[in-house]
Amino acid sequence: MIFRRKNKHEQSIFNLGKVAAVELRAENAEKSQAELSIEDKIKHSFEQLNLPIFRYLAATFGDKIQAEEITQEVFLKLYQELSDGKNIENTKAWAFRVAHNLAVKQIKRLQFVQSFSDEAWTELEKTLDSKDANPEQNLLLKEKYRRLRRAVGRLTMQERQCLNLRTKGFRYREIAEMLEISSTSVAETLYRVIEKLADETNE
Amino acid sequence: MSSMLGNNEEHPVSESLLLFVEGELQGKEIAFVQAHLDACWDCRGKISKIETTITDFTEFEKRIWKFQTPSANFSDDFNSKLRALSAETKAQKKKEHRFFDFLKFYQNLSFSAKFANVLAFVVIVALLVSQFVLRTQKVSAAEILANADASEKTKSGEVFQPVINQKIQIKKKINGTETESFAVESWNDKLRLRQRLALLETDGRKLITENAIGKNKDEISAPLALDKVRKILRKNRMDAVQPLSANSFANWRNAANLTNETVEKSVSETGAEILSINSETAATSEKGLIVSAKFSVRSSDWHPVKLVINVQNESLETFEFSETDYQVISYKNLDAGILPSVETVVAVPNAEPLESANQSAKNELETKPDANSNTNLTNKSETAEPKILIKPETASSEDELEILRVLQNANADLGEQISVERRADGKISVSGIVENKTRRDELTKALQAVAGPQKVKINIRAVDELNRTKRAPNKSETIATEEIPETTAVPVDRELRSYFSKQGIGGTALNERIEGFSRQILGRSRRVSQFGWSLRKLAEGFSAKQVAEFTPEAKAKRNSLLLARVRDFRREAQGLRDDLQPVFGNLSGAAGVGKISSEQELREAVKRLAGVSRNLDEAVRGSFTLGNAPNAAAVGNASFAQTLKTAIGLAEQIENYLK
């Protein structure tokens, strides 16, 4: 086998190739670091927000399975947005808005919506049994909660959304932006909700 | 939001009180409302109501959210989806490069090649669309069963204390040759969960003896052929008395290991369109199992008309169940010998201690002690009247009214099927079905607190107990249901759309408003109907003679129960009128109804009110639910307006009489 020493020109090309390969490896490492950080960011956001969003959706849909599916979908969408290089400043507001939009699409297929699952309701009822109170008092307390549950079940979609977003700590202006309505509409809707709940519980 | 505030002379508008509580007002607005509140008790009351409601709801939500958490594997499931998406995204990015390469290639193609490609694409899309349209026109098996079940419930709901009475011709075939044929009649008491079967012979009807029901001389034991059929049905989780029902077929279908299922359309001999579910299971060598079944309903009203089952035995046996007659009758109109009241049955399994004591005492008196006395009691009852040594304590009318009060307070007299009856032994029987075990337990506890076991016999069962054996629908059923095209509008959609559009509501908000309004009206209408029927049950729970013999206290208690429900009725009926008036008009006022001045007139008025409320509910359901034709809209016509006015007028007169 004959070994030939590289000439000067060949040597410089060889060196350039080595540099390019090193640069390419560094670029790839940077890219995979960026991918990793998006995944981590999503996981972090999911840990922070999955429960409030799930509960918002459960209260909107009344269906735990759908609420779970949409909650996951929200964060998978977030991953896609970030992967496409989009910048999202307020993740919480963005996630709730996406959850809301997905909910609206899903709800068109449903005719009747129940706010809280039967399982949750059954568990709540169990905790309401107080040894100190007499059976009739228990019954009255349960009846009050049953009426509240029923009243929430009768709310319109907008009323339900305003109520559930308000209970998640959003101010009227933020709710208005999320639902694309005016702040005055939010106030009117929430007042209507309060009246309905009060009417049902005071019957 | 300052526009929400009134001027200094007036009360602030209600919404601004909420904004005040919520801290959403600005400086001057806060001062205005605060100054007004200092002087106005009325508005302070409203503020208090808002705060109380917020507190109540927050407390309720705080409690219930503890139990509304995602499933245990929720996070793990998400993480795996995220990983999959991440991998897919990376792969997609690689594909994108390839796609751009393809675009470059496509741009370099000749015009004719490009045209051929576009044509092929259009043809594929057209094929896919036609496939989709064909698929969505199909009806799934799950939908057929759901509709058939709902149809039966609707028919039952129209009759007070419903009993389903069905006649069926049963044919057995082996290898296509008919070997046996007989007819049966069944009664299914939906309220008390009891059933009865009779054999229809040329010389008349012969009731089949059941264990829980005493045997009379006219009754016969089940013939061998029928007994065999019933065993097969039971083994396959079908209803042995009413096999030709959606519920019975669904029980088998849910438990069976189905390998294939199709839905087909056909036309019956009478020209009616029939929808049939053909279900096949995996091959089995176990005898007595159904290997395939065909369940047929009339498509016009989803009523089940025929069931054919193929059963694996020595050879393949076919059983056909064809309906020859069907009606829903009221328990009160039922021949007393068919489903006798529980108290007339002597041989009661799991008898109560008091009854056992009576039984023991009675046995002691027998001159010839019988070792099998428990099983022979039925026959003894025909020959000798048992002597009752221990007189059971009887419940008074006040006790019964107190029980009714507890049930009314818990709203158990409305949607739930609870019946209160006086038994022959003087006890009050409270029986029926409630939504779950917790509800059953709380009602039982509250009832026991007002009347002990000596006076009240409670037999309340929970739906979830009854449904324990049912399997959740599988995923494919869900998908099939989603494929059904949506019916997009309720019959009164045009009127609602016109009304809300004038209020400036449009787009998605308009659809939501219509949906919300429809739900609100349906809820009101349902409550009107429930209050009407509850009122009738209360009024007819005691005979006129019993009421005449009431003590003043008992009379006052009964009146207060009736009064509470008639007020509920009037409030909901007026609410219904107020809600519908702006949209349909011509509903204001109440019809002139004669004054009530006696118990007899009260009963007649209540009976009329219950009938009217049912008619109202039917009209509203026809107008505000999807799936009804536009011409089904009864709400808004003169007849509906008159019915609603009559309902309110009747309620007012009943209320005046009871005050």
Image (cartoon, coloured by chain):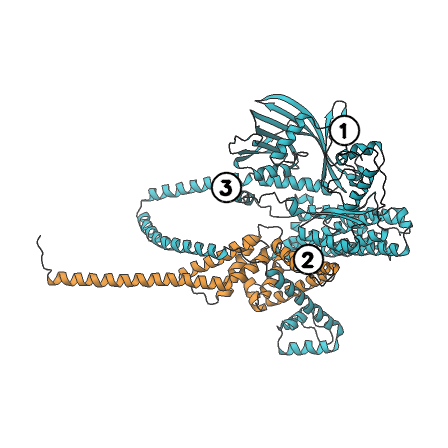
Question: Marks 2 and 1: in contact by CB < 8 Å?
Answer: no
- Is disc 3 on the same chain as disc 2? no
Looking at the picture, which amino acid does disc 1 mark?
A: Glu
B477 or B474: which is nearer to us?
Answer: B474
Which residue: 82% across, 41% down?
B361
Residue wearing tag 3? B132
Looking at the picture, which amino acid does disc 2 mark?
A: Arg
Residue wearing tag 2? A146
Which residue: 41% across, 53% down?
B84
Of all chains in the rendering, the one displayed in orange is: A
* Percent of width and height locating residue B581: 73, 55
B283 vs A163, left or right, is left
The alpha-carbon separation of the residues under discs 2 and 3 comes to 43 Å
Q: Secondary structure at mark 2?
A: helix
**Dot 2: within a 10 Å radius of its alpha carbon, few (fewer than 14), some, or many (20 or more) residues?**
some
Q: Secondary structure at mark 3?
A: helix
**Dot 3: within a 10 Å radius of its alpha carbon, few (fewer than 14), some, or many (20 or more) residues?**
few
Quarter residue B219 falls in: top right
Q: Colour of chain B?
A: cyan
Looking at the picture, which amino acid does disc 3 mark?
A: Phe
The alpha-carbon separation of the residues under discs 1 and 2 comes to 48 Å
**Dot 1: within a 10 Å radius of its alpha carbon, few (fewer than 14), some, or many (20 or more) residues?**
some
B10 or B114: which is nearer to us?
Answer: B10
Please give the chain letter of the residue carrying mark 1.
Answer: B
In which quadrant is the C terminus of chain A drawn?
A: bottom right
* Percent of width and height locating residue B213: 75, 35
Residue wearing tag 1? B219
